[in-house]
Image (cartoon, rainbow, N blue to C red):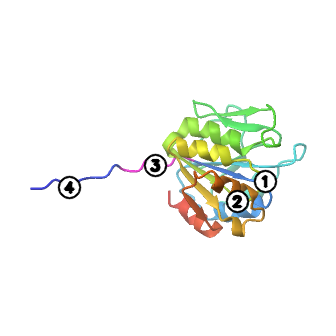
């Protein structure tokens, strides 16, 4: 009798790291609105914000998201089923113990918080259990971090530049050759929610 081959099961995603800039609020709303209240992974967002501004992003996203949304703070554990937003003027990193760290190190791609900083640290911690997403934005931030996620075995998704408010971030990410899928926002929302 022939043995049936079983394919190795794809590891469950434990964290979704999302980066965006110009036009990011509307893109984030569309994606987060599609996530069910039972979504099992942590969602960690870096959006380029004014360094001295009050961070309203978490409260704006919380109004329409079924998951709890809050600003990340130093040494806070990264919990499943929660949405975290980087605070203004701080890089957001994930430590090996899966807690957040905040940094005022130099700007990366002229910004702080930088998507690359989050992506590099998340790739080191979550490896093949990480999903990285680049949305609309007007600089190259996130492209190199997305490469690191792919190199660590994670999944990489990018918003279709043709529908992005600002297409530089998606185009730069795609140019790295490290992108698994380029999708519309609607398709991205479905792809993420099904992880």
For label 2, count other residues whose C-alpha is less than 10 Å away and answer few (under 14), some (14-19) or many (20+).
many
For label 4, count other residues whose C-alpha is less than 10 Å away and answer few (under 14), some (14-19) or many (20+).
few
Look at the picture and state if 100 lies above or below 69. Answer: above
- Distance, label 1 to label 4, CA atoms, is 50 Å
Mark 4 residue element: loop
For label 3, count other residues whose C-alpha is less than 10 Å away and answer few (under 14), some (14-19) or many (20+).
few
Q: Which residue is depicted at the point 78% across and 54% down? A: 21
Q: Which label number is shown at residue 12?
A: 3
> With 80 as the anchor, is 101 left or right in this view?
right
**Which of labels 1 and 4 is toward the front?**
4
First in sequence: mark 4 vs mark 3 = 4
Bounds of the magenta segment: 9-15
First in sequence: mark 4 vs mark 2 = 4
Look at the picture and state if 182 lies above or below 59. Answer: below
Magenta segment's dominant SS is loop
Contact? badges 1 and 2 (CB < 8 Å): yes
Q: Is residue 28 visible?
A: yes
Q: Which label number is shown at residue 4?
A: 4
- Distance, label 4 to label 3, CA atoms, is 23 Å
Query: Mark 1 highlights which residue?
Result: 57
Where residue 13 sits: x, y (%)? 50, 49
Query: Mark 2 highlights which residue?
Result: 28
Contact? badges 1 and 4 (CB < 8 Å): no
First in sequence: mark 1 vs mark 2 = 2
Q: Closest to the observer: 27 or 32?
A: 27
């Amino acid at each position: 009798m022939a043995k049936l081959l079983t394919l190795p099961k794809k590891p469950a995603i434990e964290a979704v790291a999302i980066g965006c800039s110009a036009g990011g609020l509307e893109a984030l709303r569309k994606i987060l609105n599609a996530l069910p209240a039972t979504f099992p992974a942590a969602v960690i967002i870096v959006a380029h914000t004014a360094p001295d501004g009050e961070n309203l992003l978490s409260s704006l996203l919380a109004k329409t998201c079924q998951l709890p949304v809050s600003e990340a703070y130093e040494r806070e554990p990264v919990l499943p089923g929660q949405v975290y937003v980087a605070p203004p003027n701080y890089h957001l990193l994930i430590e090996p113990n899966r807690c957040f760290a905040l940094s005022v190190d130099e700007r990366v791609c002229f910004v702080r918080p930088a998507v690359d900083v989050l992506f590099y640290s998340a790739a080191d911690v979550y490896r093949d259990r990480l999903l990285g997403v680049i949305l609309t934005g007007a600089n190259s931030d996130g492209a190199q971090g997305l490469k690191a996620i792919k190199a660590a075995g994670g999944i990489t998704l990018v918003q279709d530049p043709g529908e992005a408010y600002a297409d530089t971030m998606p185009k730069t990410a795609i140019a790295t050759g490290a992108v698994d899928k380029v999708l519309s926002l609607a398709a991205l929302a479905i792809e993420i929610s099904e992880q």
